[in-house]
Image: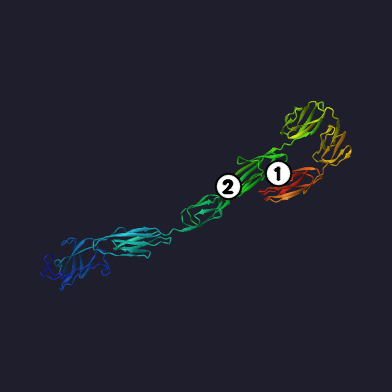
Amino acid sequence: MTIRRASCTRKPFRNHRSRFLLLFFLAVFISMFTFGPAYSAEVTLAWDRNAETNVKGYKIYYGTASRDYNLFIDVGDATTWTVPDLNEGATYYFAATAYNDSQPPAESTYSDEISKTFCSYTLSTTSQNFTASGGTGTVNVTTQTGCSWTASSGASWLTITSTTGGAVSYSVAENTSTASRTAGSTIAGKAFTVTQTGATASYTITASAGTGGSISPAGAVSVSQGANQSFTITPSTGYTIANVVVDGSSVGAVSSYTFNSVAAAHTISATFAVNTYTITASAGTGGSISPAGAVSVSQGANQSFTITPSTGYTIANVVVDGSSVGAVSSYTFNSVAAAHTISATFSTVCTYSASPTSATLPASGATGTATVTTQTGCSWTARSNASWLTITSGSSGTGSGTVTSSATANTSTSSRTATITIGGTTVTVTQLGASSTVYTLTASAGTGGSISPAGAVSVSQGANQSFTITPNAGYRVYRVLIDGTSVGAVSSYTFNSVAAAHTIRATFTRCTYSVSPTRATLPASGATGTATVTTQTGCSWTARSNASWLTITSGSSGTGSGTVVGSAAPNTSTTSRSTTMTVAGRTITVTQLGN
């Protein structure tokens, strides 16, 4: 723009009235005008130098109202000048004057006026903070219509991704360093700063679990410095937590563990054990149960028990967890998943014997007495099967006792027979006929045994009479003499069709016993062992164990030579144990090793 020279009516040169022409060009030069929009509020003015030789310099006048300039700059003899510090968004008006070198200097009137309106730019924010993980953000740019702008980043990790719609979108890369960082960017000539924190240090906690359970989380677990990390330990069905080890040291059988304020790498491992349950086995008087006591059984396993009555006893009942399962000799808990109890009770096996087992009464009638032998507590009754023979006392009793019977007179010439039943055993009573011939059979026994019936036994002519010879414990029949002549070591003898008086005598001798071996050692796992009994024919014996863990499985009694088999339950203790077996009155010592 050329500003023509105007008359100097406002500011004439002093000392003379000459006028000079000021050619004035106003051009707005914005920073980097060729490459993009300008953001700083400044303007560059340029004009042609005045042709008059006495022009000393120029002044630039400006303000925000036309022809009302409140500011000026003396620029000397320069022909271009940049006016700084102007307000964005405002319109400024500019004019120039020239002045000469007179004293005082004369100044021309204002040149033609030019104006310039500046764009203003506002950012929605001038800074933003990000964590180490990075992210994205948006800055909104507010300006007048037609005002252009650009955005640029000052760091490689801060990327401008979009500049459309009056907004700048950007992304912040992850900061893998532990140090924080700051990047500056320029948006519409304004500074925009992004600050990103450094990455937090992390440590690895290695978590593992053995067979029978799990740990969660498992494997290599990354934990930020200062953070807490919890682990949950869960046993599988049928298992329990055995131990949890943290950094090589046990923390017990815990179900959870927390590392607090982690500042180093750690390890945590869990081990598990199969659940075990206790089956408590007991036996009352008169027998045993094997195994006995507190028996430890693994989850899901089976456990069998054997119930064995002692000699003279029988199994009365077996109770499992409070409920009867009957008088069984064995019981198995299958797939054990809980604690149990098993108990066995026994009852005495009542045996009854009567002496004599037969009797002969005269035709005139008489009373007779029979002795009942049985165990204490065993009850019995006595009854006759004939009306002529009545029970006069001892019709019932408990334990050993006597029964007295009375026969009425037999008026018939024929003998008659009746039986008395006592506790399941019988006594045969024969009463002679009125005209029958009666013979006496005299029965006796030496030391070590008995004969039944004993003493003077009346027998009708033609009748039969039997005798039973029984050795005491530890004795055997040596020989039986009939009318003075030996018939051998028989256990019974019968006189058939009696036609005369007779004698019968039984003699006895002691039995000798030996057992082999007299000592045995069994492994902790349990085992069976056999002992041999050597004795004479007819010699009876019994075998019994003196500990519940050692049971007689066969050969609890016998006659003559034989064998005894014993079975030992597993020894769960680390200490060996010993007991004895009494076999035929001899002692066998049994030792079982510790586990």
Where residue 474 appears, x then y in whole percent? 80, 41
- Residue position marked by numbered label 1 in the rendering: 547
Q: Is residue 41 above or below residue 516?
A: below
Q: Nearer the viewer, residue 35 or 79?
A: 35
Q: Nearer the viewer, residue 516 or 217?
A: 516
Relative to 473, 124 lies left or right: left
Report the amino acid beneath label 1: Ala
Relative to 508, 263 lies left or right: left
Q: Nearer the viewer, residue 339 or 322?
A: 322
Numbered-mark total: 2
Residue mark closest to the camera, 1 vs 2: 2
Q: Residue at x 52, y 51 (%)?
A: 234
Residue at the outermost right position? 484
Report the amino acid beneath label 2: Ala
- Residue position marked by numbered label 2 in the rendering: 337
Q: Can residue 27 be seen?
A: yes
In terms of image quadrants, where is residue 537?
top right
Mark toward the start of the polypeptide (1 vs 2): 2
Circle 2: element type:
loop
Relative to 14, 377 lies left or right: right
Q: Quadrant of the N terminus?
A: bottom left
The residues bearing labels 1 and 2 have C-alpha atoms spaced at a distance of: 29 Å
Where residue 370 appears, x then y in whole percent? 78, 31
